[in-house]
Image (cartoon, coloured by chain):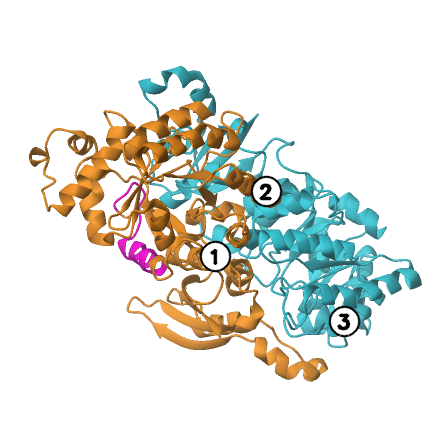
Chain colours: A cyan, B orange
Amino acid sequence: MTIEVDYRFPAGVDAERQAKVIAIGQTAGTWDARFSHREEIMRSHLGEVIAIKTEENGDSIATVSFPEINVENDIASLLTMIFGKYSMAGVGKVVGLRLDENYGKFPQFGIKGIRKLLNVFDRPLIMAIYKPALGLSATDHANILEQVAFAGLDIIKDDEIMADLDVAPTLKRLEACYPVLERVKQETGRTVLYAVNVTGSAEQLIKKAKTLVQNGANALLLNVLTYGFSVLEALAADPDINVPIFAHPALAGAMCASADTGLAYSVVLGTLMAHGGADAVLYPAHYGSLPFDAVEEGRIRDILRSRNVFPVPSAGIHPGIVPQALRDYGNDVILNAGTGIMDHPENPAAGVKAFFEALERCENQDSFELEKVPTGALRQALEKWGNK
Amino acid sequence: MTIEVDYRFPAGVDAERQAKVIAIGQTAGTWDARFSHREEIMRSHLGEVIAIKTEENGDSIATVSFPEINVENDIASLLTMIFGKYSMAGVGKVVGLRLDENYGKFPQFGIKGIRKLLNVFDRPLIMAIYKPALGLSATDHANILEQVAFAGLDIIKDDEIMADLDVAPTLKRLEACYPVLERVKQETGRTVLYAVNVTGSAEQLIKKAKTLVQNGANALLLNVLTYGFSVLEALAADPDINVPIFAHPALAGAMCASADTGLAYSVVLGTLMAHGGADAVLYPAHYGSLPFDAVEEGRIRDILRSRNVFPVPSAGIHPGIVPQALRDYGNDVILNAGTGIMDHPENPAAGVKAFFEALERCENQDSFELEKVPTGALRQALEKWGNK
């Protein structure tokens, strides 16, 4: 099996030459007569330039294939090979990556597994983020959870910057929130997932994840790019960590926001996350608060879904975007709102209700024009955040 | 204590506004009357814009200070805070980062410790990379090591793309090379370090590192950016891993090569590596084979040294650059050559000797003009690679 990578070079760069530099320099390199006894084996490790295309705007796309025997069926050794040293040449961007279906990991839960845990099969899932991001106590977390969980929320997660801090240590947050999750289950029969942010050095983090799961955590949140894909893989492979892993994209822009260098968002947040073992992946929605390309967003969605990974468009999500989100995503999506739930004019519970009202209006093909929306949670949300 | 970050914005971006977005949005965020009971605590988590400067070219530098209580005294939670979600706004670059001296980790060995292990105190260290990068057997590794180690080499490392592959599994490489290291010690009294590349999912990697050290590995190589800073920190904190850790910069260009997005090389390969626990850090030399800015290289060097971390300028290093390297670095540098040793016209041993001849000529202030260099290993190297 081979690994295929598309590198984009701007006009003026000799794409064929660069592609050869990559195919050779990022694999076996060159050798001389001293290694003739290894000739055949060396050759088997070489990459190969398999296509050079010129785009209308003058950019070139060079496709290089790499032997799978050069890597460990994981993301880190793959990244080191396809763009490790070469990234520092600063002249090209990885815009496509095709891996064999069996490369890396499959999600342990993914779309189907998370739906099964929640027993919700026929609508988008609604997810909230604890806000304010820092400064709440563990008890505050529990109080907020109580409001949103009983209002019908499916999933809640820590803010990605909420680490294991004195103000609300990770295990304390879980210990405060767990009884609420249990109570919701007993009183309503519904499961609500709380994706607890796992942090620390790799060894501590993995240990902490196990402790959290032992203490009732039913989902985890990981900042995959700041902690490392190798950490995601360790969590995904661990039989003791039998809960869905939500992957956060923090730092993705550092690798993906440049037009000419780094890697495409769809490669990092799509392909690498999907083969790294994530069950659900957060990324910016193009109608959200971060600038994001709709085409690239669509690619991420499709790549994730093709591997049963739940797409979670995020950042600036509020009830007013639900019609657009349903057009773009249909049902297999997790709509993830921070302030779009927590800062609802009424209260966070109304924020959750506004999302469900929005879903219902979409199902009934009711209008989202303000004057046609009855007084209530959705109407208040639309008044605050608009209907697009 | 606070953390200070300089963000650079191009002309046309409202730097003050962006800096406020960062100071608030990457910390506590906003809150309303419901959280008045937590007012003071919330405030203590907020970042603060402390300076906005405009550069001659119209760029602005905004400096934001962050409370240390928001992070875990590590690199991953720091990155998540200072540039996690905000990196996806795509309008600024992190060009400076000032941490308290006690933030994070100190190197376990660093310059002083590595010198002590090698018992070499008064000259640059010479380091080689096994080449060809892929395709050699474990026995080939041992044969190469024998040549270069007896020729006087200080340190050798795996190529960063040499993972734990069937062709030469990591432990087999060590098992083949260890007797050579022992023999050099017995016969010459010299210690030669072999930085073995540690790979795998985070849990496997840490376990493998311990196994390697138990089996005699006297140094490790880690692709910090593809495996994760949290893995570096785990290795650096582990009492069983009592050997120097060499940090490789693979993938750094993906985060650093863009002028307007991502983070500066000096932040990632300087500050973050130095506070992450690396003992020696590889990065491109500006006179090497990768395009690199001399000023940025100087910053990396100074940041690393200020924390006793060994700078290892790399990529395209050969004996002809020794005079320039000594001018730039003096003695506290590791000169790291791949093909610049392995592809010496004579053999890898001559490649090592050429470096030591070059060091001697520099000490004696002898010329590097080709006709003035006597026949021998250095002369051959200069004929092949030039004297600059």
Number of marks in picture: 3
- Left or right position of B283 against A336: left
- x and y, in percent, of residue B374 in the image: 10, 32
Q: Residue B64 location in percent, x, y?
A: 46, 72
Q: What is the three-letter code of the residue carrying label 2? A: Lys
First to last magenta residue range: B287-303
* Crowding at mark 2 (Cα within 10 Å: few <14, some 14-19, many 20+): some
Name the residue beneath numbered marker 2.
B207
The percent position of residue B312, horizontal first and vertical second, equals 34, 48
Badge nearest the viewer, 2 or 3: 2
- Kindly identify the residue that appears in the image at 53 percent across and 71 percent down: B68
In this rendering, position of residue A258 left or right of residue A147: left
- Same subunit, labels 2 and 3: the answer reads no
Q: Amino acid at mark 1?
A: Gly
Report the residue marked by disc 3.
A144
Asked if marks 1 and 2 touch (Cβ < 8 Å), the reply is no
Foreground mark, 1 or 2? 2
Q: Chain of mark 1?
A: B
Left or right of A85? Residue A186 is: right
Element type at mark 3: helix
* Location of mark 1 (residue): B276
Asked which secondary structure carries label 2, the reply is helix
Residue found 61% across the figure and 30% down from its top: A100
